[in-house]
Image (cartoon, rainbow, N blue to C red):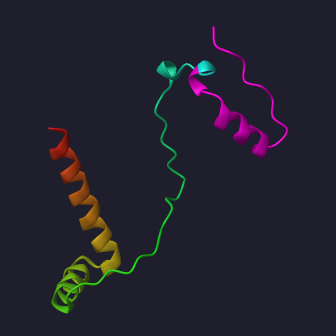
Amino acid sequence: MKKRIPKFKNENEEREFWAAHDSTDYIDWSKGKKVVLSKLKPSIKTISLRLPESMLEELKLLANKRDVPYQSLLKIFLAERIEEELETTKA
């Protein structure tokens, strides 16, 4: 039998509680289910990226052919490559 989670007056009180207690004493994580929160927008961080001018021009040409902004195409390329790399490191 797991311990009962107390009622909290506010978020700070809850944050302090979880910082000092192990959640496995209160929650049976083996019964947890994966949830997809499709309506949430991912956090976006702006970065500065230095690319050779020729690479940027080629990226813009490819994006123009696909009728998408070049920044979006770059994100697609990065996401695909990251997924590939993660799959190969699992094997």
| Residue 30 drawn above or below residue 80 | above
The answer to whether residue 19 is magenta is yes
Determine which quarter of the picture holds residue 13: top right
| Residue 26 drawn above or below residue 82 | above
Residue at left 24%, top 66%?
A: 77
Of 31 and 7, nearer the camera is: 7
Determine which quarter of the picture holds residue 56: bottom left
Most distant residue in the top direction: 1
Location of residue 23 in the rendering, given as x and y in whole percent from the top left corner: 60, 27
The answer to whether residue 46 is magenta is no
Magenta stretch, residue numbers: 1-24
Location of residue 31 in the rendering, given as x and y in whole percent from the top left corner: 50, 19
| Residue 81 drawn above or below residue 10 | below
- Compared across the picture, whether 18 is left or right of 56 comes to right
> Which image quadrant: the C terminus?
top left
Residue at left 60%, top 22%?
A: 27
- Compared across the picture, whether 21 is left or right of 87 comes to right
> Which image quadrant: the N terminus?
top right
